């Protein structure tokens, strides 16, 4: 583990509306660390309250079932942040976070983060919108988990990734890039009955129906509405 050579929050979307002087002031109050692939950044139930900004690399937010199965909740990329829940409510961490690749992280104290929110309403509004998005996504996942079949949970995960894709369009298609790893898809489906083999079988079936197709470096959903209809039929 080492410290990043560059201490710069210019790429953090949450802080993009701050002027250079304000941003540099916040940069000085951060502690900076570099994490190696698979290194834990936050431990679930930790008493830490810091907020983390990703200035380089990619991390994964995970949780664990009672049996110890890892459930992937979300991947976060350069320019995003995490850890704000504990900084706001003062309670233990709700999830663990691990680095997926070399990641440079700026760590801000909860007191400083709260000061940022009080001083800059635009930043506070962005945080609120992000929290609202988390609640909506969690609600959808709870509904999906109530469906009886592992196949449908894979359908639901594909829809979530399609919705999150910057290439999602009004023409009923979406491009998921890079191609989802089967084991990651199974983990995100959040159930012991969903395996890599299940994901492979579902994707093969959808491909035969012309709903998805695999390209060189992406998975194309050719008919988003067809996937949505499959989920609606199960949900009733």
Image (cartoon, rainbow, N blue to C red):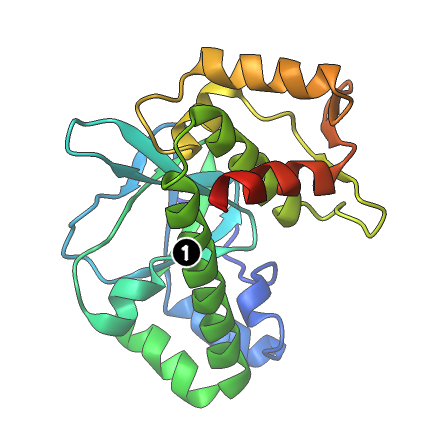
Name above or below for residue 200 compared with residue 102: above
Residue 200 placement, left or right of 103: right
Q: Residue 17: x, y in percent?
A: 62, 77
Residue 79's spot in the image, x, y percent? Answer: 56, 54
Viewer-closest of 55 and 7: 55
Quarter of the image that includes the N terminus: top left
- Does 202 sit above or below residue 169? above
Where 139 falls versus 174 (above or below)? below
Nearer to me, 21 or 95: 95
Name of the residue lying farthest toward the right: 171
Residue occupying image coordinates x 58% and y 26%:
180
Q: Please tell me whether mark 1 sits on a helix, a strand or a loop.
A: helix
Please report the residue visible at 68 percent of the width from the left and 33 percent of the height from the top.
177
**Residue 1 seen anywhere in this rendered image of the structure:** no
Q: Tally the numbered discs.
A: 1
**Nearer to me, 225 or 121:** 225
State which quadrant residue 232 falls in: top right
State the residue at coordinates (46%, 79%): 124
Can residue 227 be seen here? The reply is yes
From the image, tell me which residue sits under label 1.
139
């Amino acid at each position: 583990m080492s410290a990043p050579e560059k201490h710069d929050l210019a790429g953090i979307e949450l802080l993009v509306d701050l002027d250079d002087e304000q941003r540099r002031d916040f940069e000085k109050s951060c502690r900076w660390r570099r994490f190696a692939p698979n290194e834990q950044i936050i431990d679930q139930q930790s008493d830490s309250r810091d907020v983390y900004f990703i200035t380089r690399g990619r991390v994964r937010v995970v949780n664990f079932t009672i049996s110890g199965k890892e459930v992937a909740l979300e991947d976060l990329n350069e320019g995003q942040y995490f850890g704000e829940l504990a900084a706001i409510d003062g309670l233990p961490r709700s999830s663990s976070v691990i680095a997926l690749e070399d990641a440079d992280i700026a760590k801000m104290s909860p007191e400083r983060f709260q000061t940022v929110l009080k001083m800059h309403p635009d930043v506070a509004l962005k945080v609120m919108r992000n929290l609202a998005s988390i609640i909506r996504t969690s609600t959808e996942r709870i509904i999906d988990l109530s469906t009886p079949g592992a196949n449908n949970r894979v359908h639901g995960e594909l829809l979530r990734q399609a919705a999150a894709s910057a290439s999602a369009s009004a023409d009923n298609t979406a491009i998921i890039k890079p191609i989802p790893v089967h084991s990651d898809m199974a983990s995100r489906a959040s159930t012991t009955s969903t395996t890599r083999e299940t994901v492979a079988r579902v994707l093969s079936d959808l491909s035969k129906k012309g709903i998805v197709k695999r390209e060189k470096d992406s998975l194309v959903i050719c008919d988003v509405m067809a996937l949505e209809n499959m989920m609606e039929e199960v949900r009733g």
